[in-house]
Every structure is written in C-alpha cells, then in structure tokens.
Amino acid sequence: MSKLAGVLKTLGDAAAAANVPLGVPPGFIPHLPSHSNMHPQPPPQPMGQPPSTSGAILNTAPKSTKTTHKRVLDMSLPGPEHGNPDHAHMLANKWMNATKLAEMVKTQGLVYKKGKFSAIEEEQLRAAIEAFKAGRGLTDDQLQDIIFQKNEKGKDNAFWSEITSALALRPIIAVYHHVRRAFHPKKQQGKWMPEEDAVLKQAVADLGQQWEKVSEIVGRMSSDCRDRYRNHIANREVRVTGAWTKEEEQELTAIVTEMTIQQGKDFDNDVFWGKVSDRMGNRRGRQQCRIKWTDSLSKTVKNEGQKPRWSAQDAYILVHKVDSMNVRDDTEIDWKTLPDSDWNLWSAHSLQRRWLTMKRGIKGYEDMTHQEIMDILRVKKAHLPPASAARKRKVISAANIDEPADPEPGDAGPSGTQEGASDSQDRDADGSTDDSDA
C-alpha cells in the first residue's frame, strides 16, 4: 500500500462522528431510546446550537453582570448549513487570508468556522478526496502532486474548491493548510532525538526561522520544526522545569491579568503565551505558562484565591450544556463557549478533560455514538444535586476581578497584545494551526 493510501486509511480510521437523533427536545428531561415511541416528538432542533446557560439548566435567575479514541461514525446525520449561498460559494472558491476574512465578517456579516477540524469533517474530507481521485482516475502519486504543488500559484483550484465544498463554513485556505498537514509524508515521525535537536538548532542558526527550508534539512514537517524549536530548544539554557514556586505563580498571575483584564480581554482565551513567556524572562516556556494558567491559576484567581473543587452540580451543568448544543460528535464542541457569567470557574481545557473523564466512565463508550453516550449521561445526571451537595463558593466573572495596582515607575508596563488562542497551539483566524505569536 502506498504512503498516500496508508494516510487515507489512517485518516478514515481516526476520523470520528457521533449520532444525534433529530428529535432531541431542548429541555433536559431524560429519556431512554426504548421508550421514545411512547411520547410524541417535538420538531427537529437545528444542529450545532450554542450551549444553554447555567442559569437555565439550574432554573435560576441570571446574576447581575458587571483529546482521541475510537468512534462510531454515522455520516447520514445532517450538519450545519450555510444560510447564505453567496457566502458559501465565496468560502469555497476565494482565497482569503485571516485579515480579509475578519474584514468580511465585519462588513458583510460572513460566518465561517475556525479551530480544530472535527472528526466528522475529517471523514467528509477523506471521502471528498477519494471521490475526486476516483472521478478523474488519478494515481496516488498524481494526487500527491496536486496536494503538494511546489508552485503555490499553480495549485489546482478545482481540487481545493471541490473538497472545501464538502464542508460547511470552512474557508478554502483553512482546508488547504489542514489537508497539506494531514497528508504530509513527514508527518508523525515519533519522538525527537538529541541528534535531531542539534541539527534543528544549527539549521535555525544558519537560516533563521524559515521553517520550510529548515524542514528540508531536519527531515521533519515545517510546523513540527517550528514548534519543537520554540517550545523546547529556544532559551533552553535559562528554562526552568519542575514545580512552580509561589513567586513564579504570582508573577504569572500579574502578567496575565495585566495583559488581559486591564486591556478589557478574556484571561482564559485572549492570551498570547509567547509574550507571557518573554515577560517571565523565558524561564518558563509558552506551553508551561499556558498549562499552569488554564489548569490551575485561572480558576483560583476567579474564586478569590481559593482553589475550587469540581462538584456534582458542575457535572450536572456540563452534561446539560453539552446536550443543549445538539452536536453530532463532541469533536464539534467549541469548549470556549461553555462558560457563562454565572458558571465561569473552569477553563475550556478543564471542561473538555472533565467531559472525557465522564465519558470514559461509561463501559463500552468506545463503540458508542455521541448520542448513545449522551442518552446514558442524561439519565445519570437527570436530577439537580441537592443544595447541600454543592459547595458554597463565591464566583465572579473575569470582568469583575479587581485590577492590580499600577506598576511603579521603572517597572514593565502593559505590553501590546493581540488576540490569541489558549489551545496547545495558537490558531490563525483562517483555521490553520500556527504555533507562532506573530
């Protein structure tokens, strides 16, 4: 089997989708599939809804506001559709960079999807690529030449437009970058060896951060070379590992709050971690800073210095928030949208990990669709935990946290910031992954 055929098979095996019946009611009354014929079903709900608020789930008035496993695929389920045919055609045919896409959002109300590709999108892409190849009688090598056309001006627009049209709301440039990464012959080569690190370090010294050229010397994908260098090679001589000291935690908290709250930004999602690392003298890397903040310090700061504990009520809210989104698979969830003003202690990363823990607690979850998993969790979390089960804690939104005192003369003031992503990799507005700060 050729490399390309092997990649296609791997992509197909790894892709995942889940089953959401069209008659799921918007409320949270549990139902078992075997009893579904006993009750009339309401009209189908649109797919891909924003999550319900925690107040709606708990039936309380709103407060004043100042990872991968085997999946069962059901590709027959309808997905989101683009309401504007002209915009859909534009996304599939016009090559727009992140700046142009942002401009179109503001001036023409363009709606498009960003972030990680879902398991269902992976399967849709695999099928579209196979259909293009079969329809034109292409060999694996010919298809490889189309995907990795060395002259970008000579790329096959018909190919990229056709496979982009198989997805809803994705810009053609995002599909282009994603497919080229997924099919790259140097993808997933395993652990980096010390000899490779040495070659990478020398290549960057000779060429600078020209990652495509560096890639040819190192023999790894350009994005892998970039991430390896920035996260593990650069500033290695001053890098600290191991447990964080109290002073480091205080320094990180001060830097993040200064770069976000004082700038009117969200300190869970609008952080440029490369700049944070620079402000810490690169003693801690971008990944170290991000993980420490999202997994530990963020929720403590929001809870007035007290480390909160995950409660039965939190689990109840999470299950019903996910249920209210009516997605086909949990890879379609944008976890950053789940917190709200009354339920905001937990970062997107924390919520995703909690969800996976609950899901993996179901025996045989690997062979279940998303909806089958939801049916079980909906029953398990059918009733709101008693008030005594919920720990009392004061929850405040990021916008209401007291700002630290202004820096003394001579101290570093607020640095200019751009909106970034708090995922393990920063993401461009066009949906392509770029672990850079520029």
Image (spheres, grey):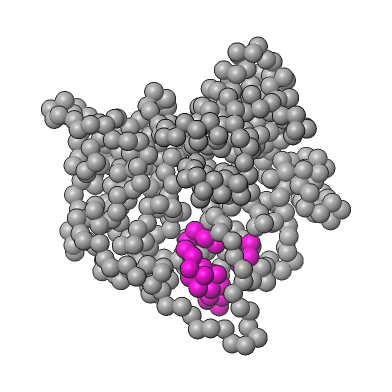
Q: What residue is rendered at 63% in x and 37% in y?
A: 95
Q: Where does the image place residue 42, in percent across and percent down from the top left?
A: 20, 33
Whether residue 349 is visible, yes or no, is yes
Q: Quadrant of the C terminus?
A: bottom right
Q: Is 74 placed left or right of 230 in the picture?
A: left
Q: Is residue 366 above or below residue 229?
A: above
Look at the image and say whether residue 416 sits in the magenta stretch: no
- Residue 311 vs residue 279, the one in the foreground: 279
Q: Seen from this angle, which residue lies furthest front?
A: 107
Q: Where does the image place residue 365, in percent across and percent down from the top left?
A: 37, 35
Quadrant position of residue 4: top right
Q: Is residue 213 above or below residue 313?
A: above
Q: Seen from this angle, which residue lies furthest right?
A: 206
Main secondary structure of the magenta stretch = helix
Q: Is 430 placed left or right of 261 in the picture?
A: right
Q: Where does the image place residue 382, in percent across and percent down from the top left?
A: 20, 46
- Residue 160 vs residue 191, the one in the foreground: 160
Q: Where does the image place residue 47, in percent across and percent down from the top left?
A: 35, 36
The span picked out in magenta is 247-276
Quadrant position of residue 276: bottom right
Q: Seen from this angle, which residue lies furthest left?
A: 38
Whether residue 14 is visible, yes or no, is no
Q: Is 309 placed left or right of 133 in the picture?
A: left
Q: What residue is rendered at 37% in x and 52% in y?
A: 338
Q: Is 172 placed left or right of 233 in the picture?
A: left
Q: How many marks?
A: 0
Q: What residue is rendered at 42% in x and 25% in y?
A: 75
Q: Quadrant of the N terminus?
A: top right
- Residue 99 vs residue 141, the one in the foreground: 99
Q: Seen from this angle, which residue lies furthest bottom?
A: 409
Q: What residue is rendered at 53% in x and 28% in y?
A: 165
